[in-house]
Structures are given as structure tokens and as C-alpha cells.
Image (cartoon, rainbow, N blue to C red):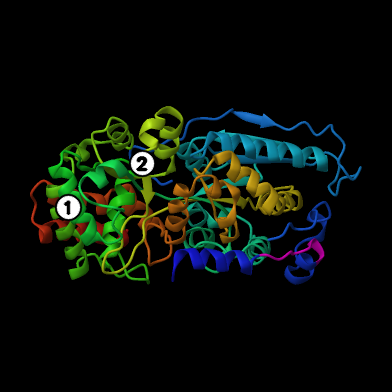
């Protein structure tokens, strides 16, 4: 379907209101936690070495002294909430979330505290007995709701209510938060990736637009490299960019790690071989060889230094260029990774909020998360992110942030087509371990340095059988 038409249809489908009373009647949410809600507005992986988000302020305490707007709180006196979150891709959005929590806490007479840690530290806290003592709400990256489902309460009524009111969730955040049919977290945001490229260098080799197919990308890549402007393809053992690119290539040709049952190893197929054969040609004829040695900042630096014509990246590079190198941003554009014979998709990072079963303040936590998910609050969060973050709900495709710079809409398309590591199977610890051990990335990289395609696939299959058998 035409992307513009689909986005428009989504906006029209969700242009309706859902009142608190309708929500409670339809979904049976605990009434005590919703009394303070206004009407709904209209509608980490365990990779070695771990990627640790920058540490935010250790704790942000909300002063509840300001009386609530209604003059009373729906919650008992002395109610407090503590959130344990990891820093996101946009520090300004994190600041906006803290400000929103401050407002809600003051209005409801609830003391809200936010503790911000790195992704690796948050994972460690969840895995450590007593590591979340005193915490009510946990921010979950990617498949944490699956890995720790036993710790998290059922948020199905809240997640389904927000989804119904706001156009439904993208596939990837929904898959990561809904565990065996139960919503163990409420999806909140997505960080997708797209190709950033130099429009002036494309024009110089006769291209008027970025290609939409892998065949077109190979043809363009050859021309750009011949002109001294190679593609920057990360292929080393870093946590984010290599997997974003090479999973996209694998999926574009119909490859997959397992079948949908999550048990049948499916890497050794003609589709995987076709993906690697394409990648081998692309690497040798279009790419900069240094990509094998890059960490997640290597391609960013190479693009900013005009060493490469294009690279797969999250929103951060483009947004930073707009601030710090506007002359490069002015000749840069964004596009989703091209489609192959099996279509177009790439991994996305997802974030969601879960309620711990041990919380002594569950009603307040549920009420806060419902309030946070409403349009007015989420719009403020997205606006502060400046395009670095996509909402998990489709209704926000018409948010003002996307109109301010139409280039950023490439990330909306990428979020819509985004998948999770382990697709088409449900998220799992085995899929997490596959990612942590770089099985897919290494399968491609071995071929780039001369290994036979079938031998490299065989090594990947052996590694997968060991992971999925454990």
C-alpha cells in the first residue's frame, strides 16, 4: 500500500475520543487508579561488551507539595512512585519525561522519583534478587518483558485501551511487550534506523533519488565507490549499527534465524545464501573496508568527515549534523533500507513501561502510565526528542515533529516495517543470546574477509544449535 495513503488512513481511523468512563466500562480497569485521570485526549540486550547509555541524574525527586488541580488526590496520603529507567537516545526527551512526572505528581499529591541508569545496569538490577526493591515501574528495552515476565504485572487492560484509542501499536513494540498473550508492559517508543546519504554525490553519479530495491542499491553503490564515495557498512562486533544493517539484508532476501515456532533452526537456506551473496558483492564493490573495524560511532564519524556517501543509522546522526554541521545536513537525506525479493524490514529498538508485581502502589502506577500514554503527554515527549524517537502507537504519525522536517518521516516508515531480533518467532532468551554473540553479523563478516558462503552459514548454524539447545 502507498505509504502516504496508509498514514492518512491511520490518522482518520484514530481521530476519535475515548473517555475515562468508556475506558473503565469497556476494559474494567481498577477504578481507584483512574479517578484522577482526565478524559482521554482525541485520538538490551546482553551483548559483550554491553552498550551502556549515558548515566542521567541519579534520581529526580518530584515535590508533591503543590496541591492537585482538583484540590484532592485519588490516592492515599503518602503514596509514592519510583521509576527505574534507562537513558534513551534523546536526553531532551528524558528531561521531558521527568518534567511530565513532576507535573503528574504535583497534581495528584504523589511523590514520584525517577532513577536513571544505563541499559546494562538496569538489566543487572532485574536479574539480581532485591535489585528492584522499592521500585514500582521499570523501563524495558526490547525483550525485557519476555526475559522477566515473572516479575511484571498484567497491564493488558491499560495497553489495549491505549492501543484502541490511538490507532494500535507497531508490530515490533507490541511483540516485545505482549508475552504469551498478556501485556507485561505498555509499549511507549521506538528508535528505528534508516539510510542517511549525500544527495549531492548521488546527483553527481546520475541518481535522482535513493534506490528502493537492493538491486538498485548495489548499482548505485558501485557508481558511488568508483567516484570516490563508498557506502559505510558497519560489520564489526558493536551493539547496534551492524545488526541493524545485516539483519535488514538477511530479511530482505527471506532469510531468518528460526521458523516461527522459535525452535526450528532455519538459517541454512537458499534465501540466506542469496542474502550473503548479494552482501559479498555489495561489500567488495560498494563499501569502505574499514567498516569491519568500526564501533557504533565509526560510521557516524566517517559520514561527518565526508569519507562515505551513505550509511545505515539511527536518527541521532542526522539530528546532530543539523546542529553541528548544517552544511552537511543540507546535502543529506534519509530513506528506509531498500527492499529485497522478500520485502523491506530492519530491526528497531523498542521501549516500554512495566509494573512490578511487588509494587505497593499499583493503582497510582497504572494511573500514571495511562496518563503518560495520552496524546498531550506523548506529544510533548516526542517534541522534546526532536525526531529521535517514534511513538509506539500509530496515531502519532501525524505529530507536528514530523511536519517540521519531512526527511524524518523515513523513520516512521522504518518503524512501521520494523522487526525484532528473533523474528518471525516470539522474542526469547535464545534470540537474545544469538544477538549477543553476533551470530548473524559474524556470518556476513566472515564472507567479507574471504570465507566460503556455505561454510560461513554452516558455522552460524552450528552456533545457533548450541544456543537453542541450552
Q: Nearer the viewer, residue 227 or 282?
A: 227
Camera sees residue 56: yes
| Residue at point 33%, 34% (across, down) | 297
- Between the residue at mark 2 and the residue at mark 1, the CA separation in whole angstroms equals 22 Å
Q: Is residue 233 visible?
A: no
- Position of the C terminus, as image quadrant, is bottom left
Q: Is residue 468 above or below residue 50?
A: below
| Outermost residue to the right | 71
Front in this rendered view, residue 440 or 77: 440
Count of numbered badges drawn on the protein: 2
> Which span is picked out in magenta?
15-21
Residue 165 location, quadrant: bottom right
Magenta stretch: includes residue 18: yes
Marker disc for residue 332:
2
Q: Residue at x 16, y 38 (%)?
A: 228
Most prominent secondary structure in the magenta stretch? loop
Q: Quadrant of the N terminus?
A: bottom left
Q: Position of residue 426 (x, y in %)?
A: 43, 65
- Tell me the residue at 84%/33% (across/down): 66
Residue 11 relative to residue 421: left or right: right
N-term mark: 2 or 1: 1
Q: Secondary structure at mark 1?
A: helix
Instruction: Give the x, y percent position of residue 33.
Output: 78, 54
Give the residue at mark 1. 282
Residue 366: x percent and y percent? 71, 53
Amino acid at each position: 500500500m502507498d505509504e502516504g495513503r496508509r498514514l492518512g488512513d491511520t490518522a482518520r481511523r484514530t481521530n476519535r475520543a475515548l473517555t475515562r468512563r468508556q475506558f473503565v466500562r469497556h476494559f474494567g480497569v481498577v477504578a481507584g487508579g483512574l479517578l484522577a485521570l482526565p478524559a482521554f485526549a482525541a485520538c538490551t540486550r546482553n551483548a559483550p561488551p554491553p552498550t551502556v547509555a549515558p548515566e542521567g541524574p541519579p534520581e529526580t525527586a518530584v515535590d508533591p507539595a503543590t496541591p492537585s488541580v482538583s484540590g484532592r488526590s485519588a490516592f492515599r496520603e503518602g503514596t509514592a512512585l519510583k521509576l527505574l529507567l534507562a537513558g534513551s537516545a534523546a536526553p531532551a526527551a528524558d528531561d521531558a519525561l521527568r518534567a511530565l512526572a513532576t507535573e503528574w505528581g504535583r497534581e495528584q499529591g504523589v511523590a514520584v522519583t525517577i532513577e536513571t541508569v544505563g541499559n546494562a545496569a538496569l538489566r543487572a538490577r532485574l536479574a539480581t534478587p532485591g535489585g528492584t526493591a522499592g521500585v514500582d515501574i521499570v523501563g524495558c528495552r526490547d525483550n525485557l518483558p519476555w526475559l522477566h515476565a515473572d516479575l511484571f504485572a498484567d497491564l493488558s487492560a491499560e495497553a489495549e485501551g491505549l492501543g484502541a484509542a490511538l490507532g494500535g501499536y507497531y508490530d515490533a513494540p507490541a511483540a516485545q511487550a505482549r508475552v504469551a498473550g498478556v501485556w507485561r508492559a505498555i509499549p511507549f517508543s521506538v528508535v528505528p534506523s534508516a539510510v542517511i546519504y549525500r544527495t549531492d554525490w548521488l546527483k553527481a553519479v546520475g541518481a535522482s533519488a535513493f534506490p528502493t530495491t537492493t538491486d538498485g542499491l548495489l548499482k548505485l553503490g558501485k557508481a558511488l565507490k568508483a567516484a570516490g564515495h563508498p557506502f559505510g557498512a558497519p560489520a564489526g562486533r558493536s551493539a547496534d549499527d551492524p545488526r541493524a544493517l545485516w539483519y535488514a539484508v538477511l530479511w530482505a532476501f527471506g532469510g531468518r534465524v528460526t521458523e516461527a515456532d522459535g525452535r526450528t533452526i532455519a538459517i541454512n537456506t537458499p534465501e540466506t545464501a542469496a542474502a550473503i551473496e548479494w552482501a559479498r558483492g555489495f561489500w567488495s564493490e560498494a563499501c569502505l573496508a574499514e567498516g569491519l573495524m568500526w564501533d557504533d560511532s565509526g560510521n557516524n564519524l566517517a559520514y561527518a568527515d565526508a569519507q562515505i556517501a551513505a550509511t545505515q543509522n539511527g536518527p541521532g546522526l542526522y539530528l546532530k549534523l543539523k546542529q553541528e554541521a548544517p552544511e552537511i545536513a543540507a546535502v543529506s537525506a534519509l530513506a528506509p533500507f531498500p527492499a529485497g525479493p522478500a520485502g523491506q524490514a530492519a530491526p528497531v529498538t523498542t521501549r516500554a513501561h512495566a509494573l512490578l508485581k511487588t509494587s505497593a502502589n499499583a493503582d497510582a502506577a497504572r494511573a500514571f502510565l495511562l496518563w503518560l500514554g495520552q496524546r498531550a503527554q506523548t506529544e510533548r515527549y516526542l517534541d522534546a526528542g526532536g525526531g529521535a524517537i517514534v511513538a509506539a502507537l500509530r496515531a502519532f504519525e501525524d505529530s507536528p515533529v514530523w511536519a517540521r522536517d519531512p526527511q524524518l518521516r523515513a523513520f516512521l516508515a522504518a518503524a512501521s516495517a520494523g522487526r525484532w531480533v528473533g523474528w518471525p518467532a516470539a522474542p526469547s532468551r535464545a534470540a537474545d543470546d544469538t544477538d549477543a554473540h553476533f551470530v548473524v553479523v559474524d556470518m556476513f563478516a566472515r564472507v567479507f574477509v574471504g570465507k566460503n558462503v556455505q561454510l560461513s552459514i554452516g558455522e552460524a548454524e552450528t552456533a545457533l544449535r548450541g544456543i537453542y539447545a541450552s
